[in-house]
Amino acid sequence: MRFILSNYGHRYLQHLVRSGALEKALEADELDRLRQVFARGVLDEDESPELAALVARGMIEPAPEGMDRDAARLRYERNPLEHIRRVVFEYTTVCNLDCNHCRNSNLEAHAEADPTRLRRVVDAVLPLGLGRFDFIGGEVTLYGKGWLDLVAYIRAQGGTHASVITSGWFFGETDFRAAGKRYADDREYLADLRARGLTHVIVSLDGPAAAHDVCRGVPGLYDRVIEGLDKVRDAGLEPRVSLVVGMGTSGAEARAWIADLSRRIYGHQAGDRVATQLLVQDDSNYVSNFIDVGGGVKLRRSRGDLAAFTDEELRCKNFFRPAPTLRIKATGEIALCPLIEGGDGYGNVHERDIVELLNHMQDAFVYKLHAERRVGAHLRFVEPEVFGGSIGHACSVRVAINMIARTMHERGVAEDDHAAIHAINVEVAEKMGILPRTGIHRANGHVRPR
């Protein structure tokens, strides 16, 4: 038989080499086999117990028909797992706030029903050198049933970094419940987070005080969050921020705002330029641009000519060479883009083994759509009469194309079936928040017209 390294096996072997742990990680026979496969590109050898064991663990797999050494090496060089540095658990989309720009505001609400299922993900990715896990919602701290049990498991298994992104709703509160447990005040809650193994608390901010509070719909929240950063540090946790730039502030005002936050977080007195760089370059923070998906649709309609978007603008390398995040949605779907409802079609960790899914990422329709530079050719299926001037960002157009093209592919819709394509456009526009929902759905913890 002929064998090649799988995506998982290649990433695993590369991590062992880079970390200096190669000799300690495997039995001698298994290690020799992995080295042989990597050195030869394709190993042509009769099946043996050692090879069968590596196949069972997802480290190697049968080589595709006709694959030679050069093709195998090219496959290794294009391993979609190579640049992943963290795992994000989108643990729930249920939230107590209704922020103006929220990308989830028009989507069905979901929450992880059985967090023990995610332990399999943790067990699979830790050997790849992925020790960082971020929890995001929705509001995980309020609605994330069992999330701290998973944090404790991560740390017990050797994970080095566990963070949660929160609105900071609990700062200044007394006698409150968070994810099913009652706390006397915010300091008791933060102490419990640290005791369970959390390392970082990341607070979401959308601009300076006035802009942030308007976006969140909670007067005074910004000041409570800023005061809460010191409480986070006092509890032995690292305070960090998740910033959306381009909505509440931009330009020089945004730089001054970020610099002030940097000084608050890190305790330095650097000038604005250095302070801003320090915060932005620290990847334990999140800094993103405003994108008009979900609630953000109503806030910006700046570019209505869909045909003006170029192929290069629409193609996204993150769909075939993701960096730095592997995201698991509350439904269990693997997602490389946080903007697409239901994931990207790479599979569901509730239904299939995570290693198997990672080893077959190249088979996914959306992977091929971008890797093979075909995404621009599908722009013609996005109907201007449905989307109109409601799309202002290339990422938003890309979301529409991905969802329309993938739905056509999965349903076997022909390119000349205009009625079916129009129906898909309407369906996607509803999910993106461009058109109102046509029924009842539960989003952000509220029941709304759909």
Image (cartoon, rainbow, N blue to C red):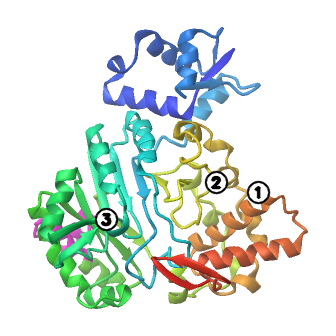
> Separation of disc 2 and disc 1 at Cα?
10 Å
* In the image, residue 87 above or below residue 220: above
| Residue lying at 39% horizontally and 63% vertically, measured from the top left | 136
**Which numbered disc flags the more N-terminal residue, 2 or 3?**
3
User: Can residue 338 be seen in this snapshot?
Assistant: yes
Where is residue 145 shown, x and y percent of the image? 37, 60
| Residue lying at 81% horizontally and 72% vertically, measured from the top left | 421
* Image-quadrant location for residue 163: bottom left
Give the SS element for disc 2. Answer: loop
Residue 179 badge? 3
| Residue lying at 18% horizontally and 78% vertically, measured from the top left | 173
Q: How many marks?
A: 3
Asked whether disc 2 touches disc 3, contact meaning CB atoms under 8 Å apart, the reply is no
Residue at mark 1: 410
* In the image, residue 434 above or below residue 51: below
Judged left or right of residue 14, residue 274 is: left
| Amino acid type of the residue that numbered disc 3 sits on in the rendered structure | Ala
Residue 345 badge? 2
User: Which quadrant does the N terminus fall into?
Assistant: top right
| Amino acid type of the residue that numbered disc 1 sits on in the rendered structure | Glu
Asked whether disc 2 touches disc 1, contact meaning CB atoms under 8 Å apart, the reply is yes
> Separation of disc 3 and disc 1 at Cα?
37 Å
- Would you call the spot at circle 2 few (<14 residues within 10 Å), some (14-19), or many (20 or more)? some
- Magenta range is 258-279
Of discs 3 and 1, which sits in the foreground? Answer: 3
| Amino acid type of the residue that numbered disc 2 sits on in the rendered structure | Gly
